[in-house]
Structure formats: C-alpha cells, structure tokens
Image (cartoon, helix red, strand yellow):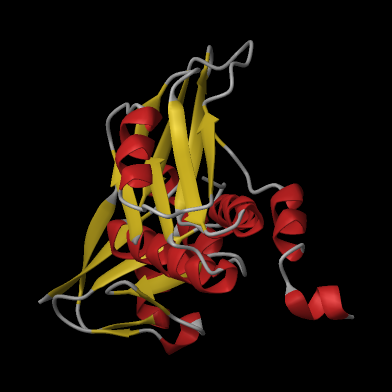
C-alpha cells in the first residue's frame, strides 16, 4: 500500500535517492511531512511541479495519490 | 512523418538524416540542426536526466505542434540522455517541407522549445565534482519570439 515518489534533478541530490516509497493514500500535506528538512522546503518552491502518473498537476495542493501511483517532483528544467 | 526519439548512446546525425530525407520524396527544402556538447575549459562531462513518463510525450506534442504550424512534410527530433562528452551530438532536429521557410523556421521553433520547455535536467562534471545547470533567462526570452499574442501586440 504505497505511492512511489520520484525525485528529479537536484531534488534527487537533496533526497540522497532517486525515489522513495511513501504510505498511501497521500495528499500534499502528507507528502510534505514525508519529506523533512531542505527537501520539503525545496518542494514547496513555486517552480517545482508535481506529476502524478505522468500528468502534471495545476495545483500541488490538490495532490491525491493512491496505492500504486507514481508521483514525480520536478524542479525547473535546465534545457535540452 | 513525425519521428521523435530519446537515445542513451552516442549517435551519428547523418545516419538519421539520410533515411529521413529519403522518406520524403518531393520535398523542396530540408533544414537540419545538430547541437553538440560544447567544449569548455573546465567541463569534463555533461549528464542529461529525463523522466520517461513526461519527456518523450512532451517532445512528441512539440513536434506535432511544429508540423501543424509550419506545414511540414516531416520532422525528426533525436535527443540524447545520459553522460556525454564535449564534441558529442546532444540533439538533432531535421525538418522538411515543400518550401525552405517552413523547414528553417520549424527547426528554430523546435530548438527554442526543447531548450526552454522539455523535461531535461542537466549537470556538468568539473574537476571538483558535479554541478546542476540552472535555467537560463535567455531560454525563456527565445521562447517568447514564438508567442503569437506577444508578436501581434
């Protein structure tokens, strides 16, 4: 019963891992409490986007992930 | 024909452009851009990370938009991921159309959007370790060139 949280770009460095399993169901508040310290602060930044199963959320606070979902935390892109 | 690929190994742009050209008999203009990892004094390697559920899908949507906007016969986008070294190709965009202008503009449009919008994160390896590359303001200014609302204002 878990949600996979994937960290991209420098968020992966802050997390120290590429992904992490968090108990489902998971909302925005639950996500922040699962990501303590500088990582949680970075994720709250305006420029960090969230995708659930490959679909971007317009509003991070609307996060509602269930068992088996994959959440990606996406910092600003640095260009191809 | 829209052909968009992500590849994690070094590639030879010519090996893609030849078959792409042959697949479009009757074309009037073909324009190709190849971006390579720039040689910098201190940079030993460049690593490009992507996120599979978003990156390719986003590039395909960009490609479809370019085909529609510039009336292309075909568009090819090949983008590297993984660790690269100076001099290696990182991106190839090739567009063909009945007339040159559409092909040239489509490549410029696709490159500006790839640079500013595509889901890639880049870091450089220097003597003291890896450094993430931050977004550049110029990339967003380049993108604004294609905003029809701004252009009309």
Q: Position of residue B144 (x, y in %)?
A: 75, 64
Q: Is residue A73 left or right of residue A42?
A: left
Residue drawn at x 46%, y 53% is B27
Q: Does residue A34 sit above or below A6 in this rendering? A: below
Quarter that holds the N terminus of chain B: bottom left
Q: Is residue A66 above or below residue A8?
A: below
Image location of residue B45, percent across then percent down: 46, 20
Question: Between A66 and B122, which is closer to the camera in this rendering?
Answer: B122
Up-down relation of residue B12 to residue A37 (above or below): above
Answer with left or right where residue A24 lies relative to residue B63.
left
Q: Position of residue B124 (x, y in %)?
A: 52, 27
Relative side of B134 to B131, left or right: right
Name the residue: 36% across, 64% down: B54
Camera-nearest residue between B56 and B48: B56
Direction left: furthest residue = A1
Q: Which quadrant is home to the C terminus of chain B?
A: bottom right
Q: Nearer the viewer, residue A64 or A77?
A: A77
Task: Give the residue furthest to the front.
Answer: B26
């Amino acid at each position: 019963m878990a949600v996979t949280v994937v960290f991209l770009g420098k968020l992966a460095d802050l997390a120290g891992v590429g992904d992490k399993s968090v108990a489902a169901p998971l909302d925005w508040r639950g996500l922040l409490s699962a990501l303590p310290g500088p990582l949680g602060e970075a994720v709250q930044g305006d420029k960090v986007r969230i995708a659930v199963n490959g679909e971007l959320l317009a509003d991070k606070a609307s996060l509602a992930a269930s068992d088996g979902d994959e959440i990606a935390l996406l910092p600003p892109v640095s260009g191809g | 024909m829209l052909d968009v690929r992500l590849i994690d190994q070094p590639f030879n742009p010519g090996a893609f452009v030849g078959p792409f050209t042959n697949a479009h008999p009757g074309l009037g203009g073909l324009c190709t851009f190849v971006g390579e990892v720039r040689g910098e004094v201190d940079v030993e390697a460049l690593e490009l990370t992507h996120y599979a559920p978003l990156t390719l899908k986003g590039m395909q949507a960009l490609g479809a938009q370019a085909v529609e906007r510039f009336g292309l016969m075909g568009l090819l986008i090949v983008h590297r991921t993984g660790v690269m070294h100076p001099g290696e190709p990182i991106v190839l965009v090739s567009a063909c159309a009945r007339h040159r202008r559409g092909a040239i503009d489509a490549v410029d449009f696709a490159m500006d959007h790839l640079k500013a919008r595509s889901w890639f994160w880049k870091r450089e390896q220097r003597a003291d370790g890896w450094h993430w590359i931050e977004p550049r303001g110029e990339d967003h200014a380049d993108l604004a060139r294609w905003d029809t609302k701004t252009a009309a204002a």
